[in-house]
Image (cartoon, rainbow, N blue to C red):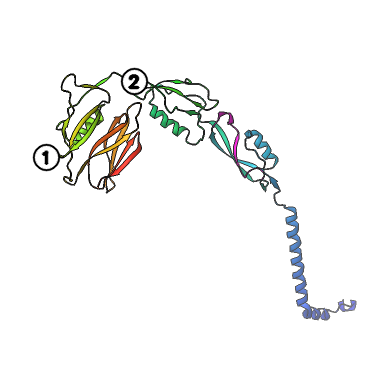
């Protein structure tokens, strides 16, 4: 059977395709592009972006209530615990980020800082401890809070006792008292034995190194002055001292003993001799005092450590030129000077 009998002329069809192939190809491409656009539009219509919501203000609320509010907004928490200034805030939200009222997409994580309660919830037992150690402990304990739960009195009550000076004898409130609000402790602190005496050491002829040892071991105040030595006197050695002509060679604790040292005007073997002088505030009991030196080369060493009740203080030294001297009380710098 011949298809031409049905009116189908393949020659004309072939000729038409040859003459119009470009138009037909363009039509196909346009249809494919339109189809792709329809598919993308349908996809983004089906897959919608997250809904935007307002962040609730939950600062000050209990964490359980805050989580319920966030869940209703399809928001999720990122929780950080921190000590607070009051035990009453334990479990409450202290901070949030973003803040309440901010507009964010649903599913966003909200950073929450939640109170872990106060650092202390009860008064500790400080009896028998050094007042200075307790002060340092308090500073460390409440370093991150602006309102500490426990404060120490600026001037505690001092009384004579056999215990070492500075030891806490009693406290109020007593240990174990619940902390519901900030308090200031009432303390009774030992000022040391009132009638105890110490033997006066004989220093004449001692070298400067031996004098420093005596200063650290003897609970007396040595008031040093300088005198230019003769050729036979060792620089820095003791020329004379106050010495009782009669009676016992004992004095009450931290009594003053005058001592004269050989202090040359010029350096000897590159060492400069002198006396470090400073006036400290009076203390209720003797505190730890130290004089440290740092050379021009950066080497640091301790010259002497001893206890002093405050007031006028003198410390002999022998250092190289350019050395920096630092006077400290309880580890805190009080003054400094450079020896030239």
The residue that disc 1 covers is 230
The residue that disc 2 covers is 163
* Element assignment for label 1: loop
Query: Is there any visible trace of residue 197 in the rendered image?
Result: yes
Percent of width and height locating residue 4: 87, 79
Give the residues in magenta.
Answer: 85-101
Percent of width and height locating residue 312: 29, 33
Please indicate whether residue 318 sits to the left or right of residue 87 in the image: left
Nearest the eye: 213 or 42: 213
Q: Quadrant of the N terminus?
A: bottom right
Up the image or down, 302 lies above or below 251; here it is: below
Q: Earlier in the sequence, mark 2 or mark 1?
A: 2
Residue 182 is marked as none
Gap between marks 2 and 1, in whole Å? 46 Å
* For the residues bearing labels 2 and 1, Cβ distance under 8 angstroms: no
Question: Quarter of the image holding residue 30?
Answer: bottom right
Q: Is residue 219 magenta?
A: no
Query: Is there any visible trace of residue 2 in the rendered image?
Result: no
Nearest the eye: 218 or 107: 218
Q: Is residue 86 magenta?
A: yes
Nearest the eye: 97 or 26: 97
Residue at image point 81% right, 79% down: 16
Please indicate whether residue 212 sits to the left or right of residue 11 in the image: left
Percent of width and height locating residue 99: 63, 43
Percent of width and height locating residue 218: 24, 27
Q: Residues within 10 Å of mark 2 (few under 14, many from 20)?
A: some
């Amino acid at each position: 059977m011949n298809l031409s009998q049905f009116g189908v002329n393949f020659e004309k069809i072939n000729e038409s395709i040859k003459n119009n192939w470009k138009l037909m190809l363009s039509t196909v491409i346009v249809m494919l592009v339109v189809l792709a656009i329809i598919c993308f539009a349908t996809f983004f219509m089906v897959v919608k972006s997250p809904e935007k919501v307002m962040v609730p203000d939950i600062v000050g609320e209990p964490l359980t209530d805050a989580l319920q509010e966030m869940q209703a907004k399809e928001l999720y928490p990122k929780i950080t615990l921190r000590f607070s200034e009051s035990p009453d805030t334990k479990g409450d939200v202290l901070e949030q980020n973003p803040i309440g009222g901010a507009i964010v997409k649903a599913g966003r994580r909200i950073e929450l800082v939640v109170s872990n309660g106060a650092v202390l919830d009860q008064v500790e037992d400080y009896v028998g401890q050094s007042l200075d150690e307790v002060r340092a402990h308090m500073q460390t304990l409440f370093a991150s809070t602006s309102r500490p739960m426990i404060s120490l009195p600026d001037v505690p009550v001092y009384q004579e006792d056999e215990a070492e000076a500075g030891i806490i004898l009693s406290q109020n409130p007593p240990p174990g008292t619940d902390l519901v609000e900030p308090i200031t402790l009432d303390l009774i602190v030992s000022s040391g034995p009132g009638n105890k005496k110490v033997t006066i050491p004989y220093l004449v002829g001692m070298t400067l190194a031996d004098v420093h040892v005596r200063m650290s071991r003897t609970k007396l105040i040595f008031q040093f002055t300088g005198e230019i030595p003769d050729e036979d006197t060792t620089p820095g050695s003791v020329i004379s001292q106050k010495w009782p002509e009669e009676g016992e060679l004992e004095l009450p604790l931290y009594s003053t003993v005058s001592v004269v040292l050989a202090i040359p005007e010029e350096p000897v073997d590159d060492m400069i001799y002198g006396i470090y002088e400073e006036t400290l505030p009076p203390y209720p009991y003797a505190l730890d005092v130290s004089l440290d030196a740092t050379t021009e080369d950066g080497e640091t060493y301790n010259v002497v450590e001893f206890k002093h009740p405050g007031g006028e203080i003198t410390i002999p030294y022998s250092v190289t030129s350019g050395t920096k001297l630092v006077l400290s009380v309880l580890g805190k710098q009080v003054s400094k000077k450079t020896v030239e």
